[in-house]
Every structure is written in structure tokens, then in C-alpha cells.
Amino acid sequence: MNKKEVIVLQNFLKSGYSTRQLDKLLGHKTTKGWISWEILKIYKLKNSDKGKLFLYSNRQSKEIISVIMKEKKESLIEDLIKMNLPRNLEKYKNTFVIAESEKNFYNIMSGETRNIIRDFFNPEKKLIGKCQFKECNEKKGQIDTVHLRKDRPEIFMECAEKYKEANTNKLFKYDVYKTMKCFLISHAKPKSICFLCKKHHCELHKIEKLSKQKLKEFKNKIIF
């Protein structure tokens, strides 16, 4: 299996990279995306297929990609998605939580949301391999997965509110599967996540408390 082609398919189908981003990932500095586009055409993939494996774990997406690379059929990815639901969400099926509020529900699920985001983005973090803050080349220290648009509790509670039902005694019934699926999908928006070293992660949190303008200036220095 061609390693370069696996990188292209994995980051196109799971991470949702554009062909320009893929070419840069392959080490081509001046490109319009044609190099990776030629690879995608070999496997009958279209631009509309970008990000279709976003919900899948790294391992499961690689399994699906291996079939695509072997069979090279038109629209094969649609059939594979129907036959292979995301395994990392299966454990939440038919599971419900009775809680007083979205915040109480989040308190129960806080560790779970942290772990699933860490595991979910770990392959991309390893691929990028360093802090994304401009001119920072930190690789040796710990690189954190950082929320940029909205923080983890806010994203979770917004999703929880969508899938709650009134219960008794001022309590609500929350669908864990639908909430967690919504929670992951919410991270598909561009620039939802970045990877920062401890120094710039802490700096971001400090700036968040200062002013919107300083926060905007800081975010503009993050290289995606």
C-alpha cells in the first residue's frame, strides 16, 4: 500500500483537508492541489467526499480506506459508510441520562468528552507534530489539543439541549448517543481545533480574559 496515497486519502476523507492542504502535507510548497487530486481520481473520489469519514476513529477509517484502495469503485465510500457505522459511538447506543440540567449532564460526561476528543484528534496531532503558533517550533514538550471556536463544555451542552426530553420532577432525559454524535460533528467546522504547546495554550487562556481584540490577534497567528 502506497504510504503517500494513504496519507492523502486519510486526511481527505477523515480530516477534511483540501487538495492544496494535502499537497503541502506531502511537502510541495507551491501547489494548487493537483498532485493530490490525481491520487483521489485514481480511487474514484470526488470533492464532495471530503470529510465523509470524520466521525470514524483512525483505525476504522484506515480499514475503510484499505477497501477503497483495493477495489477502486465509483461511489464505494457511500456503501462502506452504510455497512460500517462509527464504532467509537456504538457504546452510547440506547443509553440515556436523567439529569436536572445540561450542566449536570456534562459533569457526568466531562471525562468521557475529554477522552474522546483526545483520542479522536491524536492522529492529526501526531501528523502536524508541533505547536501551530506562528514561529513556534516546539516539538519536544507536550502538545495540547485546544478548542478555538467554543470550549468543550459549551459544545456538549448545546448538543445536549437539542436531544433532551422532559421527564418527571423537573428532570430531563438526555440521549447520550445523539448528544455525543452531535458533539463530535460540531468539531468538523474549520478551525474548531488547533494544537498548541503548553506555553501558548496557557497564553491563550490568559488572553481570553483580556479582550476580544487581543484574542483575535492571537488566533490570527495560529497556522492551519
Image (cartoon, rainbow, N blue to C red):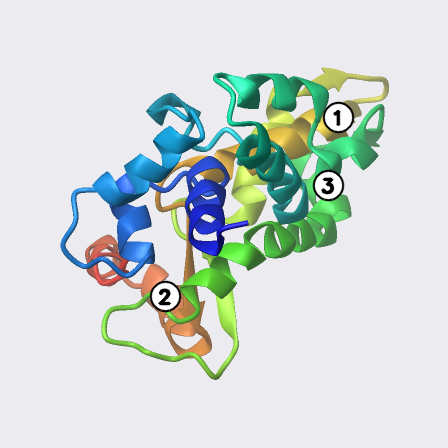
Whichever of labels 3 and 1 marks the residue nearer the N terminus, that label is: 3
Is residue 135 toward the left or the right of residue 195 in the image? left
Q: Give the number of marks.
A: 3
Instruction: Between label 3 and label 1, give the one nearer the viewer.
Output: 1
Residues at marks 3 and 1 touching, judged by CB atoms closer than 8 Å: no
- Give amino acid for label 1: Tyr
- Give amino acid for label 3: Asn
Q: Who's the residue at 18% across and 59% down the image?
A: 29
Is residue 99 toward the left or the right of residue 28 in the image? right
- Percent across and percent down for residue 119 are 64, 54
- Percent across and percent down for residue 156 are 60, 38
Vertical comparison of 146 with 60: above or below? below
Vertical comparison of 3 with 176: above or below? below
Q: CA distance from mark 3 to mark 1?
A: 11 Å
Where, quadrant-wise, is the C terminus in this rendering? Answer: bottom left
Q: Tag on residue 47? A: none
Q: Who's the residue at 67% across and 47% down the image?
A: 59
Q: Which residue is mark 2?
A: 204
- Percent across and percent down for residue 13 are 47, 36
- Give amino acid for label 2: Leu
Q: Which residue is mark 1?
A: 174
Q: Which residue is mark 3?
A: 104
Outermost left residue: 30
Vertical comparison of 128 with 77: above or below? below
